[in-house]
Image (cartoon, rainbow, N blue to C red):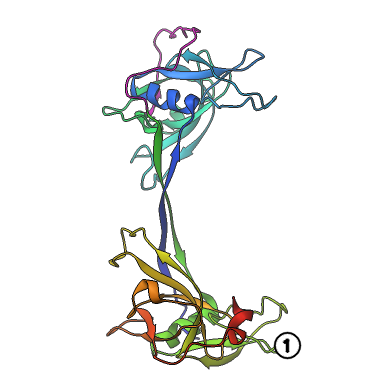
């Protein structure tokens, strides 16, 4: 049996968004230890607040302060907290209806075990020691058996000093990737500085990287075909934003490259030429680094540019 390849893979990027007046007031309020909801036309108070009524779709901006205490309406126990979650010890995810609110707020509840959690239990906000205007300003909820806090029920103008106007929310997905038969052969060939695809037995197209099946005909592919090493730039883009995990100076060019003999363009970085001289039709070849398992980049071969008619179907 061939070795089954697998490797950890992380997809991560920062999601940046600006805030409207309602979300800005809500997050700034958390920084100031104030929980704000928004009142709908029929008198309900929504926490967290939204900018449009989920029933009527009308814009709503009538902010209301609610209490930092509330009641658990439903919950689930988290036995193994993951990186970036509110607590690093087992805890409960809870929906809490804060006093004065008509909807639930999802957050963590710090409890010694699942037997200590039940629907209907009273809880209160545990504020973070350092607050910046984010949902994490609520460190978690904690059990509470004191006197109920009275919601103010009073309107709030949503104004604070130094309002939070935008947030950066990191998005990250950690998983183990196993490439399967076709891509395992492709990866193993790259370690030998070769590029292989698979030919469809029906339409005869050669797909690189191989997928194990023809996306056009829907039939399995197994015939391996070595392609390249040279290829043609079909389309490209100029990258002006530096990625924190890539030691590449900007600007640089990332391109779709149709390797000779392939019917599908793959992507790769173009080097060895000023970024503003890269063009469609440019003939390129791979550059391998010592011990590298895939081409570091592609560089011009010095050949005349390919005629547009030769690669237009691969755009």
Q: Is residue 158 magenta?
A: yes
Residue 179 locus on image (x, y percent): 50, 74
Q: Which residue is mark 1?
A: 202
Asked whether residue 295 is in view, the answer is: no
Q: Seen in the image, is 66 located left or right of residue 162? A: right
Q: Is residue 191 above or below residue 105?
A: below
Q: Is residue 160 magenta?
A: yes
Q: Seen in the image, is 207 located left or right of residue 65? A: right
Main secondary structure found in the magenta portion: loop
Residue drawn at x 41%, y 27% is: 27
- Residue 60, quarter of the rendered image: top right
Residue drawn at x 71%, y 77% is: 218
Q: Is residue 235 above or below residue 97?
A: below
Where the C terminus falls, by quadrant? bottom right
Q: Seen in the image, is 86 located left or right of residue 48? A: left
Q: Crowding near pointer 1: few (<14 within 10 Å), some, many (20+)?
A: few
- Residue 187, quarter of the rendered image: bottom left
Residue 248 locus on image (x, y percent): 30, 67
Residue 113 locus on image (x, y percent): 41, 33
Residue 148 locus on image (x, y percent): 44, 9
Instruction: Tell me the SS state at disc 1.
Output: loop
Depth check, front residue: 90 or 99: 99
Residue drawn at x 41%, y 55% is: 12
Q: Seen in the image, is 249 located left or right of residue 48? A: left
Q: Is residue 191 above or below residue 114?
A: below
Give the extent of the magenta segment: 139-163
Q: How many numbered marks are there?
A: 1
Residue drawn at x 67%, y 75% is: 215
Asked whether residue 256 is in view, the answer is: yes
Depth check, front residue: 303 or 266: 303
């Amino acid at each position: 049996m061939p070795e089954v390849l697998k490797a950890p893979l992380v997809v991560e990027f920062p999601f940046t968004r600006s805030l409207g007046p309602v979300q800005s007031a809500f997050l700034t309020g958390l920084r100031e230890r104030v929980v704000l909801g928004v009142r709908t036309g029929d008198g309900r108070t929504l926490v967290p607040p939204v900018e449009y009524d989920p029933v009527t779709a009308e814009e709503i901006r009538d902010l209301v302060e609610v209490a930092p205490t509330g009641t658990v309406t439903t919950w689930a126990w988290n036995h193994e907290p993951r990186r970036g979650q509110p607590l690093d010890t087992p805890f409960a995810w809870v929906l809490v209806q804060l006093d004065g609110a008509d909807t639930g707020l999802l957050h963590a509840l710090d409890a010694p075990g699942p037997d200590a959690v039940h629907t209907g239990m009273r809880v209160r906000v545990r504020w973070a020691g350092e607050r910046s205007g984010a949902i994490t300003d609520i460190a978690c909820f904690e059990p509470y058996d004191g006197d109920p806090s009275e919601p103010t029920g009073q309107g709030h103008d949503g104004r604070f000093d130094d309002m939070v106007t935008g947030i950066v929310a990191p998005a990250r997905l950690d998983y183990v990737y196993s490439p399967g038969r076709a891509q395992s052969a492709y990866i193993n060939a790259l370690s030998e500085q070769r590029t292989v695809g698979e030919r469809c037995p029906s339409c005869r197209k050669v797909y690189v990287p191989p997928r194990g099946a023809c996306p056009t005909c829907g039939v399995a592919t197994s015939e391996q075909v070595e392609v390249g090493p040279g290829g043609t730039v079909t389309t490209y883009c100029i990258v002006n934003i530096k990625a924190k995990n890539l030691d590449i100076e900007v600007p640089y060019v990332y391109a779709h490259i149709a390797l000779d003999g392939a019917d599908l363009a793959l992507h790769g970085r173009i080097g060895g030429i000023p970024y503003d001289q890269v063009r469609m039709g440019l003939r390129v070849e791979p550059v391998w680094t010592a011990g590298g398992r895939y081409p570091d980049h592609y560089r011009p071969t010095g050949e005349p540019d390919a005629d547009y008619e030769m690669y237009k179907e691969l755009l």
